[in-house]
């Protein structure tokens, strides 16, 4: 960065020193286990003290002045679902330093292997995992949860209930008696819902990636250097003017696809409102207009990727599958097809984030809609945090 922006040298060095300092302070704070002398907080945690109430944009501004450089440093904003002006600095600075210092990783056997590993452990410990078993109701009596009712009317009771479903439906659909939840629901109403996504999965009948010479596994193509504009395009489902992300699975490991072929994914973040007009018909199975719209968007993204990254892409396509925010809702039941849970804003980060414990006794939350955040790196620790909260309650 200094080579390309020599006039920003001091700011670049200062920025990354602050990012490293923030990481050190957070680790130190975590290791203290809540036993912190708050009167010495500014001295003991200097970077955390000066940045905890800042957005990523606010963290960046004192150090970097060139708008283009700001855009380059903030290019991974899509991983976190908000632009610099809205995203809590924690959710950008810490993962960014992790990527730069340790790299990024993919699970062997694809992401499904993670789920299978959990299932193996659960069964080995005497637990059960039931697939295709939707929960219709969380049973509550005298202010305490004691079980669930499945879609087939089966009642399952337990000493504690952990909801990994989205927080919105947990309390507005699964819990029937909300008389004691007035203040809690008012808090939920203040949080904004994250973006969803639009994806195009492609199977190619030839090894186009090798013939073109593309070496990367993930590419973010943006038409400009303004993340705020990119977010506006995503929110409005404006695929014409926004960017596109390309994942090349065959560059992750050899043999991902059949020999001589490729598997690709084109992805953009996307707001849900554009798809709301198709929602009722979609749920009834009337998808003609919906299919026209998703094909239109897919064609635009394929053309973008072909021009910018993979010449000859359209002619090489053998298989095409398209996923929209409504697809996300269908498979995950996440409210508004959200892929990040609540937006990770300043009022929903760190100690302010929705806790695991809820106002209903014995009902706990785990996953992206609670602490510490979204993505593999946060929702797996979320399960551990939730377990710790349960153990503290039982003790």
Image (tube, helix red, strand yellow):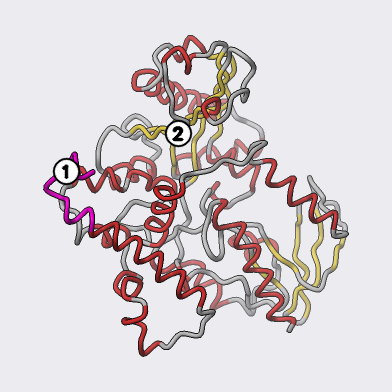
Q: Is residue 271 left or right of residue 330?
A: left
Q: Which of marks 1 and 2 is nearer the N terminus?
A: 1
- Residue nearest the viewer, comparing 226 with 209: 209
Above or below residue 277? Residue 84 is below
> In the rendered structure, which segment of residues is drawn in magenta?
1-13
Q: Of helix, strand and loop, which one carries label 1?
A: loop
Is residue 310 rendered magenta in the image? no
- Residue nearest the viewer, comparing 259 with 194: 259
**Distance between the alpha carbons at the discs numbered 1 and 2:** 25 Å
Please give the name of the residue rendered at 44% of the width and 60% of the height, measured from the top-left corner.
344
Disc 2 crowd, CA 10 A, few/some/many (<14, 14-19, 20+): some
On-image quarter of the N terminus: top left
* Residue underneath mark 2: 218
Please give the name of the residue rendered at 29% of the width and 57% of the height, measured from the top-left corner.
16
Is residue 10 rendered magenta in the image? yes
Q: Position of residue 282 (x, y in %)?
A: 61, 36
Q: Position of residue 380 (x, y in %)?
A: 62, 57
Dominant SS in magenta: helix
- Residue nearest the viewer, comparing 65 with 359: 65
Disc 1 crowd, CA 10 A, few/some/many (<14, 14-19, 20+): few
Nearer the viewer's eye, disc 1 or disc 2? Answer: 1
Please give the name of the residue rendered at 33% of the width and 43% of the height, measured from the top-left corner.
75
- Splitting the image into 4 quarters, where does residue 349 fall? bottom left
Which residue is outermost to the left? 7
Above or below residue 218? Residue 100 is below
* Residue underneath mark 1: 5
Q: Position of residue 127 (x, y in %)?
A: 85, 58
Q: Position of residue 325 (x, y in %)?
A: 53, 41
Q: Of helix, strand and loop, which one carries label 2?
A: strand
């Amino acid at each position: 960065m200094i080579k390309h922006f020599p006039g920003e040298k001091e700011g670049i060095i200062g920025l990354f020193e602050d990012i490293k300092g923030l990481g050190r302070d957070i680790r130190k704070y975590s290791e203290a286990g809540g036993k912190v002398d708050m009167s010495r907080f500014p001295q003991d945690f200097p970077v955390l003290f000066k940045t905890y109430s800042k957005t990523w944009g606010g963290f960046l501004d004192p150090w970097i002045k060139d708008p283009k450089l700001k855009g380059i440093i903030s290019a991974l904003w899509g991983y976190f679902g908000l632009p610099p002006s809205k995203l809590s600095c924690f959710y950008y600075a810490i993962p960014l330093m992790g990527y730069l210092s340790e790299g990024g990783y993919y699970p062997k056997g694809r992401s499904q292997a993670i789920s299978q590993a959990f299932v193996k452990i659960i069964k080995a410990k005497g637990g059960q995992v039931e697939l295709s078993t939707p929960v219709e109701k969380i049973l509550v009596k005298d202010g305490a949860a004691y079980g669930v009712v499945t879609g087939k009317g089966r009642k399952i009771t337990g000493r504690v209930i952990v909801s990994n479903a989205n927080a919105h439906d947990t309390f507005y659909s699964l819990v029937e008696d909300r008389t004691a939840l007035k203040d809690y629901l008012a808090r939920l109403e203040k949080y904004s819902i994250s973006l969803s996504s639009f994806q195009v999965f492609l199977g190619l009948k030839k090894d186009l990636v090798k013939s073109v010479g593309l070496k990367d596994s993930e590419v973010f193509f943006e038409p400009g250097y303004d993340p705020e504009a990119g977010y506006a395009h995503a929110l409005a489902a404006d695929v014409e003017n926004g960017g596109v992300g390309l994942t090349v699975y065959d560059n992750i490991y050899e043999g991902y696809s059949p020999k001589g072929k490729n598997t690709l994914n084109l992805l953009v973040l996307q707001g849900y409102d554009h798809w709301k007009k198709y929602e009722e018909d979609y749920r009834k199975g009337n998808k003609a207009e919906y299919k026209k719209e998703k094909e239109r968007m897919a064609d635009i993204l394929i053309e973008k990727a072909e021009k910018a990254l993979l010449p000859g892409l359209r002619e090489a396509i053998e298989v095409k599958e398209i996923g929209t925010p409504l697809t996300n809702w269908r498979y995950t039941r996440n409210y508004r097809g959200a892929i990040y849970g609540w937006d990770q804003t300043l009022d929903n980060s760190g100690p302010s984030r929705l806790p695991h414990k809820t106002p209903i006794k014995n009902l706990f939350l785990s996953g992206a809609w609670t602490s510490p955040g979204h993505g593999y790196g946060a929702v797996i620790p979320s399960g551990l945090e939730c377990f710790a909260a349960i153990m503290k309650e039982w003790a």
